[in-house]
Image: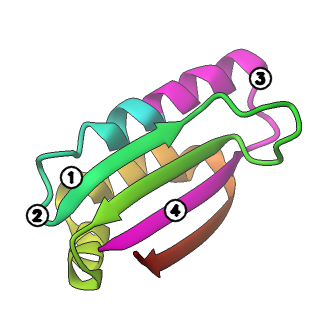
Amino acid sequence: MVKHVILWQLKDELSVDEKRDVSAGIKTGLEALKGKIPGLVDIKVEVEPLASSNADVMLDSTFESEEALKGYAVHPEHVAVADGKVRPYTKMRVCMDYEL
């Protein structure tokens, strides 16, 4: 099993309401991928960080293997969410992948 964890910071020019809406869209879009991408075991998105956080959105996902993670990265449904709901609104992305 492989964990794929991402933290994003949303763009500064977004208002509080826009950040809330964008975060909800990222959560809905990514969590809807469960059951659609081979090897994706679990996917959760957190959008309510504590005030002490310096990230706005966190993806916590689990894959059967590193190969499944590589397939997810290029899967058309994932790319559509990333290009439509994530990349236009984020200024920073940090990723960590590791074996369980």
N-term-proximal mark, 2 vs 1: 2
In the displayed structure image, the side of residue 57 where residue 2 appears, left or right: left
For the N terminus, which image quadrant?
bottom left
Could you tell me which secondary element the residue under label 3 belongs to?
A: loop
Task: Look at label 4 and name its amino acid.
Answer: Val
Q: Residue furthest front?
A: 100
Q: Which residues are magenta?
A: 1-25
Q: Which numbered circle lies on residue 37?
A: none
Task: Look at label 1 and name its amino acid.
Answer: Glu
N-term-proximal mark, 4 vs 1: 4
Task: Look at label 2 and name its amino acid.
Answer: Pro
Please report contact status of discs 4 and 3: CB closer than 8 Å, yes or no. no
Query: Could you give the CA–CA distance between mark 4 and mark 2, rounded to whole angstroms?
Result: 18 Å
Could you tell me which secondary element the residue under label 2 belongs to?
A: loop
Is 59 located above or below residue 1 in the figure? above
Q: Please name the residue shown 32% across and 39% down the image.
A: 31
In the displayed structure image, the side of residue 69 where residue 5 appears, left or right: right
Which mark's residue is nearer the viewer, 2 or 3?
2
N-term-proximal mark, 3 vs 1: 3
Query: Could you give the CA–CA distance between mark 3 and mark 1, rounded to whole angstroms?
Result: 28 Å
The residue identified by callout 3 is 15
In the displayed structure image, the side of residue 46 where residue 3 appears, left or right: left
In the rendered image, residue 43, in percent from the top left (x then y), is placed at 34, 48
Give the class, few, some or many, for how many residues have Cα within 10 Å of label 3's Cα (few <14, many ≥20).
few
Q: Which numbered circle lies on residue 5?
A: 4
